[in-house]
């Protein structure tokens, strides 16, 4: 049976414990959002910041090892892409003291060039995380990625087929993004 049942996800009845529980859940959700941002902006320091030093990753058969090694692996893959977008969907988060577990549904779109043609590779996956709170901070201790679907399509940008002008402010990577100075 899944750990993510309504009974296990239920907040504590005590109002003080409930507030702490809500704050813990929000901090874990923020760690997951920062992970996605770090991937899309190709920010190694930010990516490393969401993991404990001794964290490990089983990335669905494409990577298996330490988080330190994963950060290098991920950035090597992302360098081959023109841009990426990682989107979080529903989050299931269970808290038990200084341990937390989450299942995050995610869609990742990777734009890259294949023999001169732009391709959008869309991946739908679930990220299973074991979080630990150490020194008052929640970070990923163990991760397992489960891939559910993939679709690769030749990319065609029409920017709403003339409804809009092509944008002049587009996202950047490796420190070259408008949000860096925001």
Image (cartoon, rainbow, N blue to C red):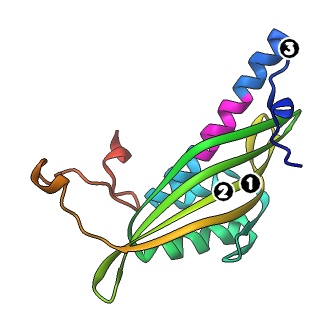
Q: Above or below — where is 36 with respect to 173?
A: above
- Which segment is the magenta one? 24-32
Residue 82 in percent (x, y) is at 35, 70
Identify the mark nearer the N-term, 2 or 3. 3
Q: Is residue 21 left or right of residue 38?
A: right
Residue 128 numbered tag: 1
Residue 58 in percent (x, y) is at 75, 68
Q: Which residue is drawn at 64% across and 38% down?
A: 29
Q: Is residue 32 left or right of residue 171?
A: right
Q: Above or below — where is 21 with respect to 31?
A: above
Q: Which residue is drawn at 38% across and 61% down?
A: 173
Residue 33 numbered tag: none
Q: Does the magenta stretch include residue 88?
A: no
Q: In this view, does 178 lie to the left or right of 43?
A: left
SS for callout 3: loop
Q: Which residue is drawn at 22% across and 50% down?
A: 169
Residue 93 in percent (x, y) is at 74, 38
**Quadrant of the rendered image containing residue 62:** bottom right
Residue 13 numbered tag: 3
CA gap, disc 2 and disc 3:
30 Å
């Amino acid at each position: 049976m899944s750990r993510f049942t309504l009974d296990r996800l239920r907040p504590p009845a005590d109002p003080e414990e409930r507030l702490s529980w809500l704050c813990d859940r929000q901090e874990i959700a923020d760690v997951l959002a920062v992970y996605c941002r770090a991937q899309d902006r190709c920010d190694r320091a930010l990516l490393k910041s969401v993991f404990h030093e001794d964290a490990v990753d089983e990335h669905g058969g494409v990577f298996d090892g330490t988080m330190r090694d994963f950060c290098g692996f991920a950035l090597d893959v992302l360098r081959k892409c023109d841009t990426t977008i990682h989107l979080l969907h529903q989050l299931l988060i269970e808290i038990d003291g200084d341990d937390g577990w989450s299942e995050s549904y995610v869609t990742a779109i990777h734009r890259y060039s294949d023999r001169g043609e732009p391709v959008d590779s869309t991946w739908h996956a679930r990220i299973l995380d074991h979080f630990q709170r150490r020194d008052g901070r929640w970070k990923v201790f163990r991760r397992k990625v489960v891939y559910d679907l993939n679709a690769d399509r030749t990319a065609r940008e029409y920017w709403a087929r003339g409804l809009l002008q092509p944008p002049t402010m587009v996202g950047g990577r490796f420190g070259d993004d408008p949000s860096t100075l925001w």
